[in-house]
């Protein structure tokens, strides 16, 4: 299973990013060019920013697209000193947002949960690193490249359009409504499920150590799924190549175009293949309909159902 070791180390790396790798520690957060940052809520001109970088420790990050003068604000259930307020700096065309002042000591036993709301320019690149918290976009979000790293917490994107998407998650559920990606949609998760209602992408690449995977109404050239433990559900609307490698858990595949069908290569140590559709067997290949989608399935243990 590729990348699984790296996924299990994500939590440690994320805590290290914020200056602390031991659960009992209270260490200062540090970042470069600290003297250039300003504290507190602010507004900025969308035309001046092409990329946004956010580093957050605890709470939530709410994302919105907007035009003109854009606002960024945070809320907390207690009054924050200037040192504990978010700090920001526009470096060229990159907006950088930090959780607090550089050098401020943060105890993992007493972290202020702060909720960040940010209006983003359409088609801007976005990078988010969050140690513990929830990332959400309740409305249509148009981005360039999206890169998200989360140690603990969930995500919820209702409508997402981007050039490419990469998410690395150590723990937490990843939920997407409608997704349109011109390039690659890549998800790496150590613990937590992935659910996408409707997805169009050039390539879909999902790597999961533990958790169910559900991808609905897939339109893609290539789909690649590596799953160590969990149930996999794929609703294939249109695809050329599909590869699924599962150690433990069932697999269910729904074919939208049953006449176009699929050519399926099934390899199992201990598992069953079930379908009510008409199948033509030829060697190690099973053909349904015209066999338009090439599907390769490898399982150690589990039942595969195609409908």
Image (spheres, rainbow, N blue to C red):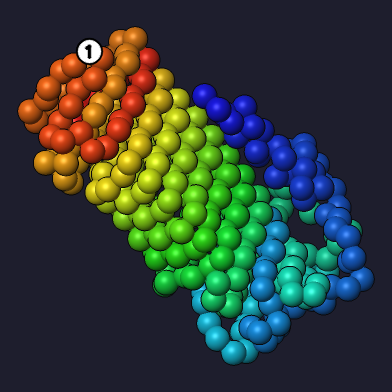
**Quarter placement of the C terminus:** top left
Q: Quadrant of residue 147?
A: bottom right
Residue 221 placed where, x, y %? Answer: 38, 46
Residue 307 in view of the camera: no
Q: Nearer the viewer, residue 26 or 36?
A: 36
Residue 266: percent from the left, percent from the top? Answer: 29, 19
Name the residue beneath numbered marker 1: 283
Q: Categorize mark 1 by other alpha carbons within 10 Å: few (<14), some (14-19), many (20+).
A: few
Q: Is residue 17 visible in the rendered structure shown here?
A: yes
Q: Residue 194's image quarter?
A: top left
Q: Secondary structure at mark 1?
A: loop
Name the side, left or right, on which 6 lies relative to 300: right
User: Relative to 261, is 31 above or below?
Assistant: below
Residue 279: x percent and y percent?
Answer: 11, 25
**Which residue lies at the image location 49% right of the left edge and 70% below the top edge?**
142
Task: State whether residue 36 is above or below residue 27.
Answer: below
Q: Is residue 28 left or right of residue 258?
A: right
In the rendered view, tell whether residue 273 sits above or below residue 158: above
> Quick check: 252 left or right of 276?
right
Q: Nearer the viewer, residue 147 or 17?
A: 147
Q: Residue furthest top?
A: 269
């Amino acid at each position: 299973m590729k990348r699984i070791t790296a996924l299990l180390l994500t939590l440690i790396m994320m805590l290290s990013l914020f200056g602390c790798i031991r659960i009992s520690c209270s260490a200062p957060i540090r970042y470069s060019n600290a003297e250039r940052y300003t504290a507190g809520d602010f507004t900025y001109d969308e035309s001046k920013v092409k990329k946004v970088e956010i580093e957050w420790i605890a709470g939530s990050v709410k994302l919105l697209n907007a035009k003109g003068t854009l606002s960024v604000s945070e809320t907390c259930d207690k009054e924050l000193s200037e040192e504990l307020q978010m700090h920001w700096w526009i470096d060229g065309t990159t907006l950088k947002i930090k959780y607090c002042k550089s050098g401020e000591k943060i105890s993992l036993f007493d972290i202020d949960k702060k909720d960040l709301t940010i209006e983003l320019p359409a088609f801007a690149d976005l990078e988010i690193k969050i140690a513990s918290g929830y990332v959400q976009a309740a409305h249509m979000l148009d981005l360039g490249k999206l890169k998200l790293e989360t140690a603990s917490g969930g995500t919820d994107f209702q409508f997402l359009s981007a050039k490419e998407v990469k998410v690395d998650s150590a723990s937490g559920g990843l939920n997407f409504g409608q997704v349109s990606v011109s390039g690659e949609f890549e998800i790496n998760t150590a613990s937590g499920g992935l659910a996408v209602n409707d997805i169009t992408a050039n390539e879909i690449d999902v790597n999961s150590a533990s958790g169910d995977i559900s991808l609905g109404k897939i339109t893609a050239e290539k789909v690649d799924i590596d799953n160590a433990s969990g149930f996999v559900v794929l609703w294939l609307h249109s695809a050329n190549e599909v590869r699924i490698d599962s150690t433990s858990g069932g697999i269910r595949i729904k074919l939208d175009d049953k006449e176009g069908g699929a050519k399926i290569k099934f390899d199992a140590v201990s598992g069953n293949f079930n379908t009510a559709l008409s199948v033509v067997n030829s060697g190690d290949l099973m053909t349904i309909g015209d066999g338009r989608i090439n599907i390769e399935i490898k399982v150690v243990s589990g039942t595969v159902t195609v409908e």
